Amino acid sequence: MILVDRARVVPPQRLLQQAANATRELQQAYDRGEFRERRITFDRRIYIDFKPYLEDLFRGKCAFCESDLQAGGWGDVEHFRPKGQATSVDGKVDVDHYFWLAYDWNNLYLSCQLCNMSRGKSGSFPVIGNRSRLPAEETALLLDPCRDQPERHLVFRGDGRVEPRQLSEELLNRYAGLHPGEVTIRLFNLNRRALVTRRREKAEWVVAEVRLLLMTGPEKIRELLSDDTGEFVALQRDIIREQAKHLIREVGQPGTFERATVVVPVSIPCEPIGITRVQINNFRAIEHVDVEFQKPWKVFLGENATGKSSILQAIAFALMGEEYLARHNRNGRSHRLRALLCDWTWRL
Ligand SMILES: [Zn+2]
């Protein structure tokens, strides 16, 4: 599961208006008491009309397990908040929740049948505290790929399994000691056997690919990290971070040639990236420097002639990459500098 920017796809106004009209009529019928004696009935055609736009938004993948639906199934239009019978972790059922979101574009997701069915017909949707009419006023325990940052809650391993990521004290307090990652894995059954097997195969491919790409510099790794089109992108990103961390130890040893290693946290695309560590060996007047930054920084202070400019120049060279330096090396010096990606500072 990855964060998906819902604003990337906007359905036609005609469909949004049709959905708004149907919601209003449903609410009026409910207010008149028409559903006291019988279950609320929905017009499936209205939310099914959104399906092509959901396929575009979620790149043809299940929003929850990231399986490719174009290759292996039609995919369901899933109501993240169920149309009715919303069930809590303790089994309590709220019959009417959330009928008013049945046609709401923001409540619709593309899902494989296994993720959809694993939640069961009971429509599990646990929340902390009371339910609300407005999603923004609820603390949901299921991770929402369009609102939450799933990478903060889930970690994918090389063996294909997914585990809850360790949460900060602040987040745990927000969820009353429960872990949304654990609840999400359980309710969507994200460790089902066939899924784990396919993720393990993808992990093996990513490991091989990263080792290959690291030889050509960090740019290709960044491209792979930004790619959200294939299956199991969340796993791909976690494996890249893990591999880059592993390899940085291999090349980070002091060498006999000029080298600078700049460590930046591997982050999800669109998040600003800050340099968190700089290691320099045998560059200009610097024999060895290893600076770790505990917080994001913009200013670098130091006494005169202590090597500030050399450090900044080394960072610049390292971030340019070897290929760029080789092409623009006009002074005849060979700076064998590298920028590597690492998630040492990946934190919540
Ligand atoms: Zn799925």
Image: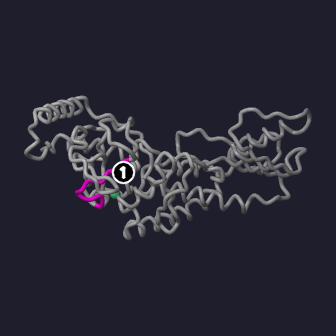
Side (left or right) of 5 relative to 111: right
Q: How is the image coloured?
A: one colour
Query: Residue under circle 1?
Result: 63
Q: Position of residue 190 (x, y in %)?
A: 39, 62
For label 1, count other residues whose C-alpha is less than 10 Å away and answer few (under 14), some (14-19) or many (20+).
many
Q: Position of residue 203 (x, y in %)?
A: 50, 64
Main secondary-structure element of the magenta-colored stretch: loop
Residue 217 in sight from this viewpoint: no
Side (left or right) of 333 relative to 86: right
Which quadrant of the figure has residue 276? top right
Whether the magenta-drawn stretch holds residue 234 is answered as no
Which quadrant of the figure has residue 134? top left
- Quadrant assignment for ligand 1: bottom left
Say if disc 1 is inside 8 Å of ligand 1: yes
Q: Residue at x 39, y 65 (%)?
A: 195
Tag 1: residue type?
Ala
Task: Please tell me whether residue 72 is drawn above or below residue 261 in the rendered image.
Answer: below
Whether the magenta-drawn stretch holds residue 120 is answered as yes
Residue 19 in sight from this viewpoint: yes
The one of 72 and 258 positioned closer to us in this rendering: 72
Q: Position of residue 269 (x, y in %)?
A: 52, 43
Q: Position of residue 196 (x, y in %)?
A: 42, 67
Side (left or right) of 324 relative to 18: right
The one of 102 and 135 positioned closer to us in this rendering: 135
Magenta-drawn segment: 118-127
Q: How many marks?
A: 1
Element assignment for label 1: loop
Q: Residue at x 86, y 51 (%)?
A: 288
Q: Residue at x 25, y 42 (%)?
A: 98
